[in-house]
Amino acid sequence: NAGVTQTPKFQVLKTGQSMTLQCAQDMNHNSMYWYRQDPGMGLRLIYYSASEGTTDKGEVPNGYNVSRLNKREFSLRLESAAPSQTSVYFCASSALRDSEAFFGQGTRLTVV
Amino acid sequence: KNEVEQSPQNLTAQEGEFITINCSYSVGISALHWLQQHPGGGIVSLFMLSSGKKKHGRLIATINIQEKHSSLHITASHPRDSAVYICAVSRSTDKLIFGTGTRLQVFP
């Protein structure tokens, strides 16, 4: 019962480097999300995808790009990492709007 | 002012105590979610409710739509309940709005 799988769990990047965070769900969910979690703040939505082939900006999209490769996979790319992107990133999925959300284990990213 | 406010921010309890965490929101919602996050761990959905009350084991969640308020209760608390509890609301869009969480520590 994998649910939502994120990779990697930890990553350290140098300023200016690029990387892609991978997320896959095996629950046949339509909606997928990328959030970041910073100390003292609630989770903030970076991008979401309501269905395969569609993506939309969330609250904090600057510096990120996403790809909904197929129904299962939703990746988040940092083209040129900045220290302000040091955070814990969570991928989530849900069957429909307003249905229960399932989260991955998180990726702890440090940009030095 | 945040659209979703939780109280308290931090909570300590002795094992066996009854615990209440509160969540107030200022926007119209279609559902309210309670989530649990253990240190260094992922986030798990505990409840999703749009009215009334739900119970799962020692956890009880209630919501008062008129007062825009929800509570999460833990009966007979245990050290393994130590975690951050997050309230989130969903609206007519796909997006969840999150509170900043309540950090609970239960001591033996």
Image (cartoon, coloured by chain):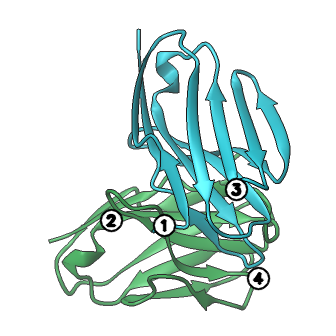
Q: To which residue does mark 1 refer? A: B2
**Kind of residue indicated by mark 4:** Ser
What amino acid is labelled 3 in the image? Lys
Q: Earlier in the sequence, mark 4 or mark 2?
A: 4
What letter labels the chain drawn in green?
A
Three-letter code for the amino acid on which mark 2 is drawn: Ser
Residue B85 as seen in the image, left or right of residue A77: right
Q: Chain of mark 2?
A: A
Q: Measure the alpha-carbon separation of dots 2 and 1.
A: 20 Å
Give the Cα distance between marks 1 and 4. 29 Å
The chain identifier of the residue carrying mark 4 reads: A
Can you say which quadrant of the picture contains the C terminus of chain B?
A: top left
| Residue bearing mark 2 | A87
The quarter of the picture where the N terminus of chain B appears is bottom left
- In this structure image, what is the colour of chain B? cyan
SS class, disc 1: loop
Whether pointer 2 and pointer 1 mark residues with C-beta atoms closer than 8 Å, the reply is no
The residue carrying pointer 1 sits among few (fewer than 14), some (14 to 19) or many (20 or more) residues within 10 Å by Cα, namely few
Q: Secondary structure at mark 4?
A: loop
Q: Which mark is residue A51?
A: 4
**Residue, x 75% and y 39% (percent of image)?**
B62
- Secondary element type, mark 3: loop
- Residue labelled with disc 3: B68
Q: Residue at x 73, y 79 (%)?
A: B93
Q: State whether discs 2 and 1 lie on one chain.
A: no
Rounded to the nearest whole Å, what is the CA distance between mark 3 and mark 2? Answer: 31 Å
Residue B3 against residue A50 in the figure, above or below: above
Q: CA distance from mark 4 to mark 2?
A: 26 Å
